[in-house]
């Protein structure tokens, strides 16, 4: 993965650093551009030192850490380790997949110049799925949706946005009935959010399946779809999503995990 060039092209003169990560002359006033230009101007020693410092609080520093890791990987600044994967695991305690997510978030946001102040509150677990599809035109719409959804629900909403509406794969034309109704803009927002939430809960990509479950729950006298067992929720979230939730709920528990190559 090559370091993004957009930020460097915006600023003619790179900022000078007097200490690890401390910038003394930001030129643009654009936070994302300034951070990217700062990172691209780091020396090998400062990049390695800054990566360790940022790794102490990944939730807060994930964007900067992604950029510094990108710089380290691009320049092969991981001497003393077998490869970049080993460097990441031994230095930060997480698998290369997470590092790739952080690096991709950095690259996507900087390349497309997405305003950092609009997305910084979302956290890396949502941005890893959202950043690839964000544009300057749709960022406000998707950030609003992401604010109201869990990670799993957001993944379902993103998947549904690029999938055909309705599951007709096993039905003939005569087996399908069409329902038509009109909604106001605020009602549309409620309906689409509810469908996305339901798709996340029942692990489906189809609007009609989600709607059926919402209606079945209403008929049964419950709010939304029927609650799923813990086992079903963990299966829907996947091993990584499950561990992310576990880490947030019990951050003081230190677990050592070895993931088979096929699951990475």
Image: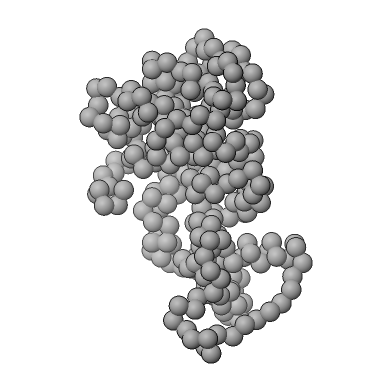
The extreme left residue here reads: 82
Q: Is residue 152 visible?
A: yes
Which residue is pictured at 42% across the width and 15% down the height?
Answer: 43
Colour basis: one colour
Answer above or below: position of 8 versus 128: above
Answer above or below: position of 188 versus 12: below
Estimate the x, y position of residue 151 in percent, counting from the top left.
51, 52
Q: Is residue 56 left or right of residue 178?
A: left
Q: 141 or 111: nearer the eye?
A: 111
Estimate the x, y position of residue 100 in percent, counting from the top left.
39, 39
Q: 115 or 223: nearer the eye?
A: 115
Estimate the x, y position of residue 95 in percent, counting from the top left.
33, 40
Q: 171 or 53: nearer the eye?
A: 171
Which residue is pictured at 63% across the width and 64% down the height?
Answer: 192
Which residue is pictured at 64% across the width and 18% down the height?
Answer: 27
State the image quarter where residue 31 is shown: top right
Which residue is pictured at 57% across the width and 43% down the height?
Answer: 122
Q: Is residue 98 left or right of residue 151?
A: left
Q: Is residue 217 visible?
A: no
The extreme top residue here reads: 18
Q: 112 or 57: nearer the eye?
A: 112
- Please give the count of numbered marks on the rendered protein: 0
Estimate the x, y position of residue 176 in percent, counting from the top left.
55, 85
Answer above or below: position of 161 versus 248: below
Which quadrant is the N terminus positioned in?
top left
State the image quarter where residue 33 is shown: top right
The extreme right residue here reads: 184
């Amino acid at each position: 993965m090559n370091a993004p060039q957009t930020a460097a092209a915006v600023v003619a003169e790179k900022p000078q650093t007097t200490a690890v990560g401390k910038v003394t002359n930001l030129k643009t006033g654009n936070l994302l551009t300034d951070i990217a230009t700062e990172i691209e101007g780091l020396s090998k020693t400062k990049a390695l030192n800054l990566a360790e410092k940022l790794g102490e609080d990944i939730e807060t520093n994930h964007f900067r850490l992604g950029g510094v890791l990108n710089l380290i990987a691009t320049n092969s600044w991981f001497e003393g380790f077998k490869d970049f994967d080993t460097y990441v695991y031994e230095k930060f305690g997480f698998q290369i997949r997470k590092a790739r997510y952080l690096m991709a978030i950095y690259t996507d946001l900087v390349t497309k110049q997405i305003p950092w102040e609009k997305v910084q509150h979302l956290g890396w677990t949502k941005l890893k799925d959202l950043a690839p599809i964000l544009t300057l035109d749709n960022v406000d719409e998707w950030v609003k949706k992401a604010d109201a959804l869990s990670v799993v629900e957001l993944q379902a909403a993103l998947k549904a946005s690029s999938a055909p509406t309705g599951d007709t794969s096993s039905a003939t034309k005569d087996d399908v009935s069409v329902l038509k109704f009109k909604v106001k803009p605020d009602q549309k927002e409620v309906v689409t959010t509810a469908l996305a939430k339901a798709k996340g809960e029942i692990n489906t990509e189809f609007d009609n399946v989600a709607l059926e479950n919402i209606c079945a729950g209403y008929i049964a006298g419950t709010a939304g779809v029927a609650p799923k067992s813990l086992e079903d929720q963990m299966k829907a979230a996947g091993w990584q999503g499950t561990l992310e939730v576990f880490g947030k709920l019990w951050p003081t528990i230190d677990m050592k995990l070895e993931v088979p190559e096929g699951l990475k």
